[in-house]
Amino acid sequence: MRAHLGDQLVIENAATGAARRDGEIIGLHHDDGTPPYDVRWSDTGEVTLMFPGPDAHIRHPEHERQEPAGEAEPAATASAGPGGAAGPGDIGRRIAAERRRRGISRVETARRARMSPDYLAYLEERSGDPTLATLIRLADAFGTTVAALRGGDMELPPGQGQALLHPELRDLGQEECRALLSTHGVGRVAVSGPDGRPVVVPVNYGVVEDAIVFRTAPASVVARAAETEVAFEVDHVDEALSQGWSVLAVGPASVVTDPEVIRELGLRAHTTPWAGGRRDMWVSVRPTRLTGRRITPADE
């Protein structure tokens, strides 16, 4: 008998062949996948060390996905995203990204989700296909939803959750605004388009010596920001808690022309522009006005 993390261990009734008990294998003790196994039983949620007997067999998730519709376990559909397009690798990447975004270690996440850290590593790194019960525990550990971990809200704009019962909207000070701008991320720059109408474009940006910098192509709409006063906005929305903040920076934009400064910006850039293509023109915005607001519960 050989198993992988995430497989199901099924104990059958010797007389009828019906399943008496099943659980998820969340820990291996041998590299070749032979027993014993750490098994989390589906009926109690308890984890025990299991030496399977002759009435036990392994059920592999990849076999379940080949079963006819209506006969598969919840794990068979756990990785479906919008239109069923998301694969198990996508779920693992979303789990890892959500964990990093919230600043939670793998060990702490596993503790909150009541699973083995090794199994969590398997899900994140080896395209594991978690069961619905596992996704529910992970969503609870992150304070999010199973749909979000599956990618079901990828195409939805943020902020569709319920508002706080007693929200408080407060203005942010200059130092807090600067801290929230941080050093890099995705923000939006507002410029006048070719027809004179306002255009808002998302850009990957960084903050260097109090200047907001981003790369673009000379012929792009964003390039029109150069030598004009622009508005630059960045925000964050916490769907699970119905909280969020936004920061607005207004100031003159200019093209960076000093070769040494351009080289330094390239070295210090955290990411390349997500839009791709050649974007070698650096634009710098030095805020003359910085404002922000935050929504929190009234009792905080």
Image: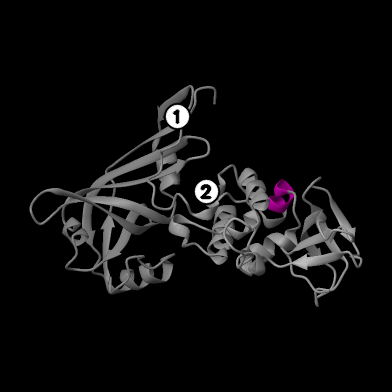
Above or below: residue 6 compared with residue 41: below
Image quadrant holding the C terminus, namely top right
Number of the label disc, if any, that sits on residue 163: 1
x, y (%) of residue 138?
64, 49
**Marks 1/2: CA–CA distance:** 19 Å
Q: Is 282 rendered above or below residue 288? A: below
Q: Label 2 amino acid?
A: Ala
Helix, strand or loop under label 1: loop
Q: Say whether residue 68 is magenta.
A: no
Of residue 68 and residue 181, the one placed in the foreground of this image is 68
Residue 299 bears which disc, if any? none
Report the magenta stretch's main SS. Answer: helix
Coloured how? one colour
Label number found at residue 147: 2
User: Which segment did they paint magenta?
Assistant: 108-113
- Name the image quarter holding the N terminus: bottom right
The residue shown at (21%, 59%) is 222
To which quarter of the image does residue 100 belong?
bottom right
**Mark 1 or 2: the one toward you:** 2
Mark 1 is surrounded, within 10 Å at the Cα level, by few (under 14), some (14 to 19) or many (20 or more) other residues, namely some
Compare marks 1 and 2 and give the one earlier in the sequence: 2
Q: Could you tell me which residue is drawn at 28 percent across and 74 percent down?
A: 278
Q: Nearer the viewer, residue 220 or 75?
A: 75
